[in-house]
């Protein structure tokens, strides 16, 4: 059974945690879907983990469409959400509609995600939702604003915390079906989660969100560097390096292939 936004809303009401991971290609997406992940996010983090950029900013819309379509082909059950890349939606409402429309039409994903809770972002969410494009919000640490905010925790002062709460409520009122809360204090994430009827998905925001998301490369131990709030469940960098080393040794020694 393919999951829908209505499932997520129902799960929040039931207290059932929502599992979210990122994917950037067919193989990873298929594995995540088979494992029972609820939301597969084609995050712009793929610019770093799959394409080798230092930030998410260089990722183009064409590259995102390419990867999102590959992910979609690997998924039968999970709800797929695709990030809108930097400067593919911020110039105008018209640009945002065109970009989000292309993402849904050309890739087959079911929803888009955009960063920010400022007035322009709220208007964008409202307009997209009004024409039937589901939108996930993203506030707190927003990686597309790295040159302005850095990667430090957000919402540490009472003023900043109140601003983030206000942004979350505004996003819900604008029609967002869920909100990612990234790298904010646990108490703040708990307050926001309690105030909203839509699910919150935490990353570095403590245990009191309605769900959790990690970058899959971090979870699998593929990343060179990890944020402080990530957890590796296996060290695939080590396993893959050992396997390649063993293969290389066997080839050099004439042990593979066997005659």
Image (cartoon, helix red, strand yellow):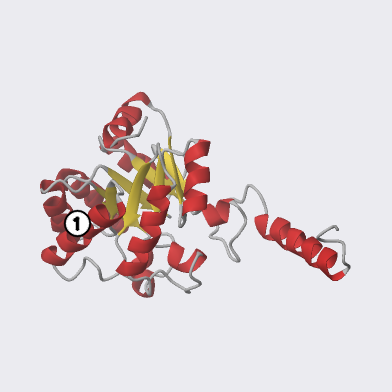
Measured along the vertical axis of the image, is residue 257 above or below residue 110?
Answer: below
Residue 177 is situated, as x and y percent measured from the top left of the image, at 25, 42
Quadrant for the C terminus in the image: bottom right
Count of numbered circles in the view: 1
Residue at figure coordinates x 76%, y 60% from the top left:
242
* Picture quadrant where residue 15 is located: top left
Decide which of 73, 177 is in the foreground and name it: 73
Residue at (17% x, 44% y) in the render: 175
Seen at 13% across and 57% down, the residue is 123
Q: Is residue 150 above or below residue 29?
A: below
- Element marked by disc 1: helix
Q: Is residue 184 visible?
A: no
Task: Choose between 194 and 146: the one closer to the eye.
Answer: 146
Whole-percent x, y for residue 229 in the image: 53, 53
Residue 58 visible here: yes
Q: Nearer the viewer, residue 108 or 177?
A: 108
Q: Measured from the top left, where is residue 9 in percent x and y?
A: 29, 32
Name which residue lies at 16% across and 58% down.
Answer: 124
The residue beneath circle 1 is 101
């Amino acid at each position: 059974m393919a999951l829908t936004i209505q499932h997520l809303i129902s799960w929040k009401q039931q207290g059932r945690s929502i599992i979210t991971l990122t994917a950037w290609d067919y193989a990873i997406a298929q594995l995540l879907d088979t494992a029972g992940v609820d939301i597969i996010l084609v995050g712009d983090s793929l610019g770093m983990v799959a394409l080798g950029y230092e930030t998410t900013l260089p990722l183009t819309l064409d590259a995102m469409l390419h990867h999102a379509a590959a992910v979609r082909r690997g998924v039968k059950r999970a709800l797929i959400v695709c990030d809108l890349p930097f400067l593919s939606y911020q110039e105008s409402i018209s640009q945002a509609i065109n970009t989000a429309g292309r993402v849904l039409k050309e890739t087959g994903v079911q929803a888009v995600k955009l960063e920010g809770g400022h007035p322009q972002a709220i208007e964008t969410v409202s307009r997209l939702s009004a024409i039937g494009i589901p939108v996930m919000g993203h506030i707190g640490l927003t990686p597309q604003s790295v040159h302005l905010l850095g990667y430090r925790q957000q919402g540490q002062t009472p003023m900043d915390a109140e601003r983030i709460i206000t942004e979350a409520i505004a996003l819900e009122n604008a029609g967002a079906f869920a909100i990612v809360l990234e790298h904010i204090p646990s108490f703040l994430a708990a307050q926001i989660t309690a105030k909203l009827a839509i699910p919150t998905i935490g990353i570095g925001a403590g245990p009191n969100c309605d769900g959790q998301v990690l970058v899959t490369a971090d979870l699998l131990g593929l990343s060179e560097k990890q944020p402080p709030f990530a957890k590796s469940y296996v060290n695939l960098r080590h396993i893959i390096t050992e396997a390649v080393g063993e293969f290389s040794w066997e080839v050099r020694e004439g042990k593979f292939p066997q005659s």
